[in-house]
Amino acid sequence: VFSHVVRAPEDPILGVTVAYNKDPSPVKLNLGVGAYRTEEGKPLVLNVVRKAEQQLANDRSRVKEYLPIVGLAEFNKLSAKLIFGADSPAIRENRVTTVQCLSGTGSLRVGAEFLARHYHQRIIYIPLPTWGNHPKVFTLAGLSVKTYRYYDPATHGLNFQGMLEDLGSAPAGAIVLLHACAHNPTGVDPTLQQWEQIRKLMSSKGLLPFFDSAYQGFASGSLDADAQSVRMFVADGSECFVAQSYAKNLGLYGERVGALSIVCKTADVAGRVESQLKLVIRPMYSNPPIHGASIVAAILRDRDLFNEWTIELKGMADRIISMRHQLFDALRARGTPGDWSHIIKQIGMFTFTGLNSEQVAFMTREYHIYMTSDGRISMAGLSSKTVPHLADAIHAAVTR
Ligand code: PMP
């Protein structure tokens, strides 16, 4: 009965790893997926995560019962505090509902399903370009996806004017997806002044912000600094959605731990919204997994572990910044044509190199370097040892 089923293409991002795994070359390099690697090219389990897991293992009172539909209460509370700030009036006034979801993706999806059921406006604006899964998540939830101009290929920077024009002509009440920091795939963020202008425009038009926070701490190395955009919007009393992921900043990729927060006008509304979120979640996966959320709660509640986390996080962010400088210097040393300063200007995990899909295909074929066809490279997958190989490949690709 399934003989008519046609083979679907690989996911454009995860498919890069599938192709990489098949390549027998000893010099192959995977810069496709956004997962942190050490200088030795190995995945990293943070020390604080190991300590928290040890604590959990030693606690014989812990059981494996189901969590409530909305997840671990303490995790939700601490997650809201992490993104909105310890002194957030919205939290103090109980206007925030936070539910534990399946990492960033699951949080986006639950938020989108809620919006499709309970919000009067179906249109969501997403940046052009954006993370490839965004349009699929929102479309499949029943929203209608439009884009706003974001990246300017000519400057490798923000098309701020275009962004303001597109948001300015959006219908009243439209939902707007914003990357809280470290925009994926471009590595280009608005400045605080620009955020302020975006906020004013959105508030005057009654646009609803939906923040995707997948890289808190990865952009600047500071958890608070990377939450500034979100806090700015919440400070003016606006309602907003935030999807948080602990995949990158705690290295908990496979634990699938994240949270959706909805900031409402009153505590009463927040309570009703939460009751409806439960109806969204229950028939999808019933309730979320306990292990990752317990690790996060153990770290966020304990001052020493929290401080240790911030140091390890800064270590990851700094290593990525150092890779940016090394790659930039290596291209300069080779006299590679072009202005590559965007490599050091862009922030977060990725550099949007400006290489086109043909050049990418050439680098994969001739140099065994794997990346998405839009020319995005994960700086977190590079090391001092592999920078020269990548610089050689880029040089060959652009001088071909
Ligand atoms: N949003 C953005 C912008 C991302 O880059 C990612 C991860 N690549 C996610 C959300 C979701 O990641 P996860 O579901 O693993 O938390």
Image (cartoon, grey):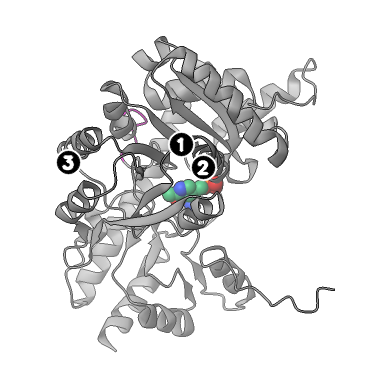
Q: Residue at x 40, y 10 (%)?
A: 93
Camera-near label (3 vs 1) is: 1
Name the kind of residue labelled 2 in the image: Ala
Q: Is residue 187 visible?
A: yes
Q: Main secondary structure of the magenta part?
A: loop
Q: Is residue 305 visible?
A: no
Q: Which of the image's four quarters has the N terminus?
A: bottom right
Residue 155 sits above or below residue 221 on the image? below
Confirm whether the magenta stretch covers residue 222.
yes
> Magenta residues, as a range?
220-224
Mark 3 and 1 residues: CB-CB less than 8 Å, in contact? Answer: no
Residue that label 3 marks:
194
Element marked by disc 3: helix
- Residue 370 horizontal/vertical position (percent): 48, 71
The label on residue 119 is 1
Mark 1 and 2 residues: CB-CB less than 8 Å, in contact? Answer: yes
Confirm whether the magenta stretch covers residue 74.
no
In terms of depth relative to the viewer, which is nearer, 219 or 228? 228
Q: Which of the image's four quarters has the C terminus?
A: bottom left
The label on residue 116 is 2
Choose the circle earlier in sequence order: 3 or 1: 1
Q: Residue at x 64, y 40 (%)?
A: 255
Q: CA distance from mark 3 to mark 2?
A: 29 Å
- Residue 217 horizontal/vertical position (percent): 38, 36
- Residue 298 horizontal/vertical position (percent): 59, 21
